[in-house]
Amino acid sequence: MPMLFSFVVLIAMVFALVDIITRDTWLVKHLPKFAWVLLVIFIPFVGTILWFAIGREYPASVSRPRMSWGADAAPARPVPSDTRSTEQQLADLEREVEYERMRAELEALKRQDRSELSE
């Protein structure tokens, strides 16, 4: 049994060290990465628990969604990303503005024609 505990601590320590080393610096809390590595190496059991409990910043995208049983129980749909370049987006917006301007002018001409016919 003590051998199994030692093996589990060793595996957890390796996972913690790999996680510390590969994690971006801005996702590490309370101590620098080097200090966390030393803590996990010199105090494996406590250092590993502390790393996963307080030293690691969990991004918002990793958090698990809450279970909902109401009307909003439908899963959230991913938002499609726009793959057009900025220039393409601006050109599309300019075309849309021009279309709306021309449509407004056409409506004004139709109203003018109607008013002239009714007179």
Image (cartoon, rainbow, N blue to C red):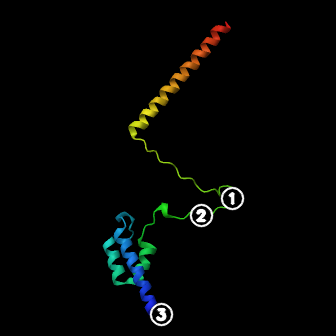
The alpha-carbon separation of the residues under discs 2 and 3 comes to: 37 Å
Residue 116 x, y percent position in the rendering: 63, 8
In this picture, residue 66 sits left or right of residue 87: right
Q: Residue furthest bottom?
A: 1
**Residue 66, disc:** 2
Residue 66 x, y percent position in the rendering: 59, 63
Camera-near label (1 vs 3) is 3
Q: Is residue 11 above or below residue 95?
A: below
Residue 44 x, y percent position in the rendering: 38, 83
Residue at coordinates 39% horizontally, 80% vertically from top-left?
A: 13
Q: Quadrant of the C terminus?
A: top right
Q: Is residue 84 above or below residue 52?
A: above
Name the residue beneath numbered marker 1.
70
Residue at coordinates 41% horizontally, 81% vertically from top-left?
A: 11
Considering only order in the chain, which callout, 3 or 2, is on the residue closer to the N terminus? 3
Q: Secondary structure at mark 1?
A: loop
Q: Amino acid at mark 2?
A: Arg
Name the residue beneath numbered marker 3.
1
